[in-house]
Image: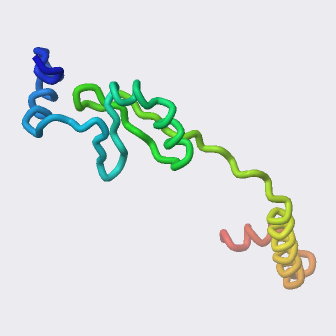
Amino acid sequence: MREHDVPSSGRTSALVARRAEKGPLSDSESTDAVRRVGLRELKERMSEIVRQVEEDGEAVDITRRGAVIARIVPVQTKPPFDREAFERRWAEHEEFARHISDGWPEGVTAVDAIRDVRE
């Protein structure tokens, strides 16, 4: 008896039946969205698969008898702090603040300006 011929009940048997109609899974089935890897292949190639997830930044679905049971996803890391980019951006904000200040009417507070716009 082959693995996908194992009798089961309920939802699992429906999944197995639909999968059997499509034919046996390859060890490394892919979809447009996420690559799929069977448990057996994962067991045999764990280090390689995890390295690919890390390097490519793409998730891998883990399947048992054609059904996805888990997903390996890369960890999202923050890029390192870029001091030069921060200082450039800060200078842009300072320039914008000067531009606003140059055209701001004498004796009008920001609160007064907002009240005036809301009325």
Q: Is residue 88 left or right of residue 119?
A: right
Above or below for 56 versus 9: below
Residue furthest to the right: 107
Q: Quadrant of the C terminus?
A: bottom right
* Camera-nearest residue between 59 and 81: 59
Could you say where residue 3 lies in the image, as x and y percent from the top left? 17, 21
Residue lying at 11% horizontally and 21% vertically, measured from the top left: 5
Q: Nearer the viewer, residue 73 or 50?
A: 50
Question: In the picture, which quadrant includes the N terminus?
Answer: top left
Q: Residue 27: where, in percent of width, then height?
A: 28, 35
Is residue 109 visible to us here? Answer: no
Relative to 20, 114 lies left or right: right
Q: What residue occupies the far bottom of the structure in this picture?
A: 103
The structure residue drawn at horizontal position 15% and vertical position 24%, both measured from the top left corner, is 4
Residue at point 79%, 53% (across, down) = 81
* In this view, 93 is above or below 4: below
Q: Is residue 94 visible?
A: yes
Taking depth in this image into account, of 27 and 74 the one nearest to the observer is: 27
Q: Residue furthest front?
A: 44
| Residue 34 in the image, given as x and y percentages of width and height | 36, 46
What is the total number of numbered labels drawn onto the structure image? 0
**Residue at left 10%, top 15%?**
7
Residue 61 image-quadrant placement: top left
In the depicted view, which residue is nearer to us: 11 or 116? 11
Q: Is residue 69 left or right of residue 11?
A: right
Image quadrant of residue 40?
top left
